[in-house]
Image: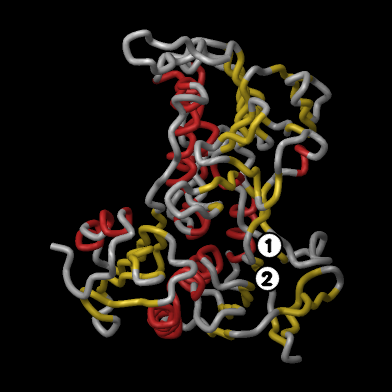
Amino acid sequence: MPGRRDPGTGVSAAPAPPSRIAVVGASAAGLSVVEGLRRQGYTGALTLIGEEAHLPYDRPPLSKQLLSGAWDTDRLRLRGRDEIAALGLELRLGSPAVALDTRAREITVADGSLVGYDALVVATGTRARRLPGTESVRGVHVLRTLEDAVALREGLATRVRLVVVGGGFVGAEAAAVARGLGCEVTLVTDTAQPMGDALGDELGALLRTVHHEHGVRIDSGVLVDEVLTDGGRASGVRLADGRTLAADAVLVGIGARPNTEWLTGSGVPVGNGVECDATLYAGSGVWAAGDVACWLNARTGEPWRIEHRTNAAEQGLAVARNILAGPERATPFDPVPYVWSDQYDLKIQIYGRTRGADEVRVVEGSTAGRKLVALYGRNGRTCAAVGINMARALRGYRAQVAAAAPLLTGSAA
């Protein structure tokens, strides 16, 4: 409902808030939404629905601290039970949403119950992609949930031969951790260098060197055709060039798919995630946040979908603000994306989006010194800044990324 106009300013006042808000997805984005609503004074009915039985937990440590054994599972919790209870919401965990009726404004949950709402936030995230035919093969792992990480950690405990399929964040981080646990590790990636999509060839080559120094074998520029089995258990992989690699365990890290199947037939626009406008609104009272949200970036005019922890939290807060502001006062979500990766003694940090960059300039430090800041450009404008072991210096380039400024050739100081 539109808000009334202030006779002095002509600007619409914020409308009355929805009486009932439901959030589907109880991870970082969903938690951020409900906390943001309460912080901004929302007193209406709140329901948080989650597929997993766990309280909201942090996912980045799954391929780092939890996999290595440095953390136990309790340290992953984003909030304790008392903190969740203090939000005064209905918490429904362990039973996912399976259907949506936007006309009746009702969510069907797997246990058969219906949850009504006036505004809905879809924060269902993504699920790991799998190699076809490997779903029931023992010893083949993915790494997306707490159970995934615990199963992989147990599988690596005997210092097995591990083949990692995929050289992105999850694959490269898990390879580093597994090597630290004493496993024999081979990383197979279809890019020229590990994390090549995020870092490009020059910085990816540095990462490759560091992995080699720690004993990881890397097969690059090649695809995996199939996982070989023996008695229903993984025994290796066959590469597209015909070679085979022996393995006791296989980790598949080839990306993720948005969890949108439950929206089929609802009228909510779905493509590469839930398709939203610049304010994260999908229409029919539905908003989206986190890995599942594909929104129109107002600055670039391009659809963005970002699978980063910081983005999930920021989008959750933005959705909370925009729901309460109403459509006339809602503001575009225009972040500077941030993501990091810890591998061996390298701290890799990225501001912005490196995808689509056509130029890379190392502006501070060097690859030889393994401390550097590199700027990534697209059509002569800065689209990202990457730092390796130079966190403080990197922060100085954030504003340049935000402004899409012309590429610099020297320090931002």
- x and y percentages locating residue 402 in the rendered image: 32, 53
- x and y percentages locating residue 372 in the rendered image: 26, 73
> 175 above or below 112?
below
**Mark 2 lies on residue:** 249
Q: Amino acid at mark 2?
A: Ala
Quick one: quadrant of the C terminus?
bottom left
Circles 1 and 2, Cβ within 8 Å, touching? The answer is yes
> 55 above or below 342?
above
Question: Can residue 188 be seen here?
Answer: no
Residue sitting at 72 percent across and 65 percent down? 140
Residue sitting at 45 percent across and 85 percent down? 212
Q: Who is closer to the viewer here, 4 or 247? A: 4
**Mark 1 lies on residue:** 141
Secondary structure at numbered mark 2:
strand
Q: Which mark is residue 169?
A: none
- x and y percentages locating residue 33 in the rendered image: 50, 29
